[in-house]
Amino acid sequence: MRSGGVESVLHEVRSAYPVAPYYLILEFENGEYRVANLRPFLEGPVFEPLKDPAFFRQVRVDPDARTVVWPNGADICPDVLYARSVPLRLPEEFGE
C-alpha cells in the first residue's frame, strides 16, 4: 500500500463510489464521507491503468485490507486517502 509519508491513524474504508474521472466518495469507519481526487496518485506502472475511466470505475473495497483496490492489484493506504480528501458537504437545503 502507498503511504505517501502520512502518519497512520488506522482509518478504514467502508465503501467507495466513483463519481467523476479520478474522484471517489469514500465512507470511512467513523461514518464520515469524504471526497478524494486520485489524479495525483496515478503515477507508475500499477496506477497507469486507472487513467482509463472505465477501469477506474472498477474500484472496490477489499474487506481484508479495508481500503480501495482495483483488479490489477493497485491500492492506496486508507490513512493517505483520509488525509488527502475533503469532507463531503451537502447543499444547505439538506443540512440540519
Image (cartoon, grey):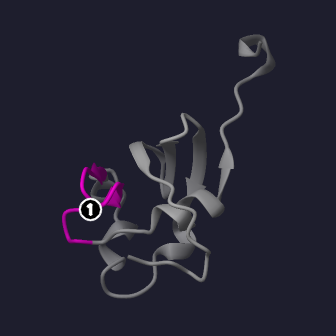
Badge 1 density bin: few <14, some 14–19, many ≥20, Cα 10 Å:
many
- On the rendered structure, is 52 left or right of 13? left
Q: Is residue 35 above or below residue 8?
A: above
Q: Is residue 45 above or below residue 53?
A: below
Residue 5's image quarter? bottom right
Query: x, y (%) of residue 54?
Result: 29, 54
- Compare residues 85 and 7 and report the one nearer the observer: 7
Looking at the figure, which quarter contains the C terminus?
top right
Specify whether residue 4 is in view.
yes
Magenta segment boundaries in residue numbering: 60-73
Query: x, y (%) of residue 37?
Result: 58, 59
- On the rendered structure, is 56 left or right of 39? left
Looking at the figure, which quarter contains the N terminus?
bottom left
Query: x, y (%) of residue 90?
Result: 70, 26
Q: Residue furthest bottom?
A: 44
Which residue is located at x 43 percent, y 49 percent? Answer: 13
Q: Residue furthest front?
A: 9
Q: Is residue 84 above or below residue 13?
A: below
Specify whether residue 84 is in view.
no
Query: Which residue is label 1 attached to?
Result: 70
Give the amino acid at mark 1.
Answer: Trp
Residue 95's image quarter? top right
